Amino acid sequence: MAKPQEVIPAVPWIPLPTRRILDPMERRRVVDDELDAHFLTFSVDHRRRLLDHDQPKRILLGILNDQLQRRQATCVGFVVMPDHVHAIVWVPERGQLSHFVHEWKGRCSRRIPAGYREGIAAYSREVPLGDRFSKPKYDSFAIYSRKKREEKLNDMHANPARAGLVKRPVDWWWSSTRW
């Protein structure tokens, strides 16, 4: 004799909560309400290689150094790549990281294209300067421990070797690897 099939009671349909789509500005909020160091990354707009030459790199690092002095901040490490920048920065006041980065990028946006127009005109014809130097946003990752700081330092210092710019990270002049 056949076994009767088990009847599964109907479950009333319950709508699942809809996932709220965040505004891009809200999604990329930088939390710097604690006094942690931050791993920062920002890219040149459209990933143009505006940091290929030494002079733009010098300008970028000079402005970083000036920003550090103005804000009494500390840079734990940095790497300048042809189309993006990494840095680990500690700012001594809560809520000041975005101001620090905004000023750094803003000053670079004025000085680097001007340097290209004045000194490396042939390169600026090959690589269009565009309306802005860097993308408007940047990425920030709070570093809470020594282990995470060392991990991020090692990762960013290895970036030039991974990109094939040098054989060993220590050979890249535009980073803090040697220190």
Image (spheres, rainbow, N blue to C red):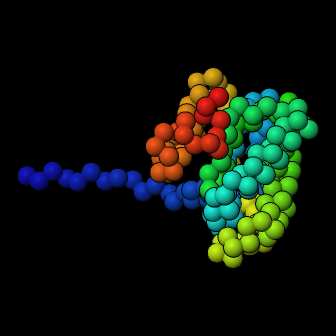
Whether residue 39 is visible, yes or no, is no
Identify the residue at the far bottom of this view: 125
Whether residue 50 is visible, yes or no, is yes
> Which residue is more in the foreground, 15 or 123?
123
> Which residue is more in the foreground, 164 or 13?
164
Residue at 69 percent of width and 76 percent of height: 125
Q: Position of residue 42 (x, y in %)?
A: 69, 52
Q: Quadrant of residue 149?
A: top right
Vertical order, 41 against 21 (above or below): above
> Which residue is more in the foreground, 65 or 1?
65
Q: Quadrant of the C terminus?
A: top right
Residue at 55 percent of width and 36 percent of height: 170
Q: Position of residue 68 (x, y in %)?
A: 84, 37
Vertical order, 178 against 139 (above or below): above
Identify the residue at the far top of this view: 146
Q: Position of residue 131 (x, y in %)?
A: 78, 72
> Which residue is more in the foreground, 115 or 33?
115
Identify the residue at the far left of this view: 1
Q: Position of residue 50 (x, y in %)?
A: 68, 62
4 left or right of 34 in image: left
Residue at 85 percent of width and 55 percent of height: 107
Residue at 63 percent of width and 58 percent of height: 52
Number of marks in the rendered image: 0
